Amino acid sequence: MKIMLLAFCLGVILNAADDATLPAGKKAEQQACVACHSTRIIESQRLSPAAWKKEMAKMIGWGAVVPNQEILLDYLTTEFNDSKPVPSPEHSKSK
Ligand code: HEC
């Protein structure tokens, strides 16, 4: 019984930590980029760092407010760069 209680508490703690441990770049994305479209249109891209920079500038030109530009650019160029495989159609459909 005690073990179950412990496991429950641990679960609650880990769950609460989940949001706090979201990468800073992901948070910046959610903060700056979802006003007009979902993150899917962003995360299904595979772009070079230069192209991400241009893409972000384009979105800012269209009205995106990006308080953490460096953090976001770092996140986009690391996670969704053109050396990574493109996501499968199933993946892009389900989100
Ligand atoms: C002011 C509204 C707005 C905001 C905020 C915004 N976007 Fe967009 N974004 C658009 C529009 C409009 C399109 C193109 C329309 C479509 O196809 O749905 C688009 C499309 C895109 C695309 C697909 C390629 C392209 O250029 O069409 C990417 C990648 C993208 N946005 C990235 C971002 C990122 C990264 C952010 C956050 C920094 C962001 N967007 C914030 C309006 C916005």
Image: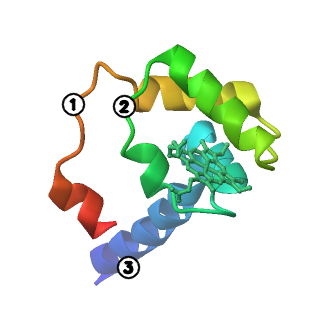
What residue did someone put label 1 on? Answer: 85
Q: Compared with residue 58, is residue 5 higher up or lower down, i.e. above or below? A: below
Residue drawn where x is 63% and y is 60% of the image: 34
Q: Which of the numbered marks, if any, corresponds to residue 5?
A: 3
Is 47 displayed left or right of 27 in the figure?
Answer: left
Q: In the rendered structure, which amino acid carries the disc numbered 3?
A: Leu
Q: Position of residue 73 (x, y in %)?
A: 62, 27
- Dot 2: element: loop
Q: Position of residue 30 (x, y in %)?
A: 63, 55
Label 2 neighbour load within 10 Å: few <14, some 14-19, many 20+: many
Is 18 displayed left or right of 79 in the figure?
Answer: right
Q: Are marks 2 and 1 in contact (CB under 8 Å)?
A: yes
Q: Which of the numbered marks, if any, corresponds to residue 24?
A: none
Q: Compared with residue 32, is residue 49 higher up or lower down, i.e. above or below? A: above
Question: Assess mark 3: CB under 8 A from ligand 1?
Answer: no
Q: Quadrant of residue 57?
A: top right
Q: In the rendered structure, which amino acid carries the disc numbered 1?
A: Pro
Instruction: Tell me which label, 3 or 1, sits earlier in the chain.
Output: 3
Q: In the rendered structure, which amino acid carries the disc numbered 2?
A: Arg
Q: Compared with residue 91, is residue 43 higher up or lower down, i.e. above or below? A: above
